[in-house]
Amino acid sequence: MVRRRKKSIILWTVFFDSSRPRNLGRKVPRSLAVRCPSVEELEEAVKALGFDYEVYKEKRYPRTWFQDSCQGYVKVYKSPDMAITRTKLLRMVAEKLREIRQKKAK
């Protein structure tokens, strides 16, 4: 029997940070990004969307390993029958992060 590994997509907190330019890691448009999201917020967004995931809080984004702000990532596992691209997942999570921030602001 051949074991197949689940495919995964890594979501760094930096991908959703509105204070960073695209060349330093931001992957979503500024209109969808939030200021310095935490790993806990990212985890909450992924959990609300119903994905399987693992959290890595102490890891640092390789391009800016020397900075302490916005560290950590969430590894999202996708099943073989799930037809979702990385870009679509990034947008979904970004929208959910904005919703979470708006609820906390109220």
Image: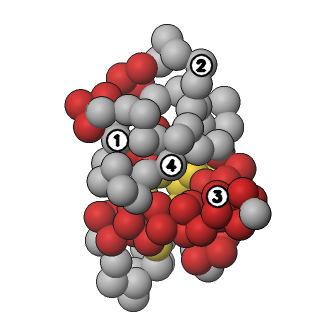
Tell whether label 4 touches label 3 (CB within 8 Å): yes
Q: Amino acid at mark 3?
A: Arg
The residue singled out by tag 4 in the image is 34
Choose between 1 and 85: the one closer to the eye. Answer: 85
Q: Is residue 44 left or right of residue 93?
A: right
Q: Residue at x 48, y 68 (%)?
A: 95
How far apart marks 3 and 1 lie (CA) works out to 18 Å
Q: Is residue 83 left or right of residue 52?
A: left
The residue singled out by tag 1 in the image is 26
| Classed neighbour count for the residue bearing mark 2: other residues with Cα under 10 Å, few (<14), some (14–19), many (≥20) | few
Q: Amino acid at mark 1?
A: Arg
The residue singled out by tag 3 in the image is 101
How far apart marks 4 and 1 lie (CA) works out to 10 Å
How far apart marks 1 and 2 lie (CA) works out to 16 Å
Tell whether label 2 touches label 1 (CB within 8 Å): no
Q: Amino acid at mark 2?
A: Asp
Whether 88 is drawn above or below 82: the answer is: above
How far apart marks 2 and 4 lie (CA) works out to 17 Å
Tell whether label 4 touches label 2 (CB within 8 Å): no
Q: Quadrant of the C terminus?
A: bottom right
Q: Which quadrant holds residue 14? A: top left
**Which x, y percent locates residue 63?**
36, 23
Task: Single out the mark in the foreground, 4 or 1.
Answer: 4
**Which x, y percent locates residue 97?**
56, 61
Q: How is the image coloured?
A: secondary structure
| Classed neighbour count for the residue bearing mark 3: other residues with Cα under 10 Å, few (<14), some (14–19), many (≥20) | some
Please give the label number shown on residue 71. Answer: none
**Which x, y percent locates residue 83?**
33, 83
Tell whether label 3 touches label 2 (CB within 8 Å): no
Choose between 19 and 57: the one closer to the eye. Answer: 19
